Amino acid sequence: MLHLKNYLKLSVRVILTILLATSIPSYASEDAQFSDYQLGSGDRVKITVFGEPELSIETRLSDAGTISYPFLGELEVLDLTTSQLSNKVAEGLADGYLLNPNVNVTVLEYREFFINGEVKKPGSYPFQPGLTLQKAVAIAGGFTERASKSKIFIQKDGSDEDPIMVDLSQQVSPGDIITIDQSFF
């Protein structure tokens, strides 16, 4: 009788573990679908193939917006969302390598934004989700004494358009170029 109880406890644990393991990837994939962030050169991503640790990698997008992935070779991923990249890798692996691969993609490190002009420490800085212009100026050491707090321009990443004048509440995106002009007084 004691052996039967132990066997039943072990069986329940195994079943719960299997159910948990098969449900986690679907939640992870759903989370990835909510993101509309488009990948760009310099982003670092983690691709996880559940149950296949040798196919899980961390990589940075090249200047051309590509990554090298086992079995699939060079993949063009520029401007894809994490969900689209997850689907692309899953489809590639399902084509002769794995049955029903479950793939999750997360952004480990976003590409940098750039800030120049009248800030104490101009340069490039790692993007952080939720970044506003006011926070970006703080990261760059604050305004200089000659900075204009009204003549602030952003050129969006990849845009050929002229920079637009913005205020300190403006959201900043990875790859944006921020310019703080001088004040005349």
Image (cartoon, rainbow, N blue to C red):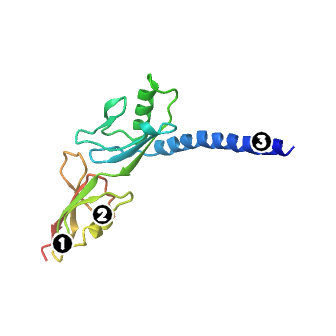
Give the residue drawn at x 38%, y 51%.
108
Specify which label sits upstream in the sequence, 1 or 2: 2
Label whose residue precedes the other's in the sequence (2 or 3): 3
Residue 108 visible in the snapshot: yes
Disc 1 to disc 2: CB gap under 8 Å:
no
Q: Quadrant of residue 70?
A: top left
Graded by Cα atoms within 10 Å as few (under 14), some (14 to 19) or many (20 or more), the crowding at tag 1 reads many
Q: Amino acid at mark 3?
A: Tyr
Q: How far apart are labels 1 and 2 at the CA level? A: 14 Å
Q: Residues within 10 Å of mark 2 (few under 14, many from 20)?
A: many
* Amino acid type at mark 2: Leu
Residue extending farthest to the left is: 184
Q: Is residue 152 above or below residue 90?
A: below
Q: Which residue is mark 3?
A: 7
Helix, strand or loop under label 1: strand
Mark linked to residue 133: 2
Dot 3: within a 10 Å radius of its alpha carbon, few (fewer than 14), some, or many (20 or more) residues?
A: few
Res 95 label:
none
Q: Which residue is mark 1?
A: 147
- Which residue is at the front of the view, 16 or 80? 16
Q: CA distance from mark 2 to mark 3?
A: 60 Å
Residue 112 percent location from the top left of the image: 27, 55
Q: Give the quadrant of the C terminus.
A: bottom left
Residue found 32% across the figure and 60% down from its top:
170
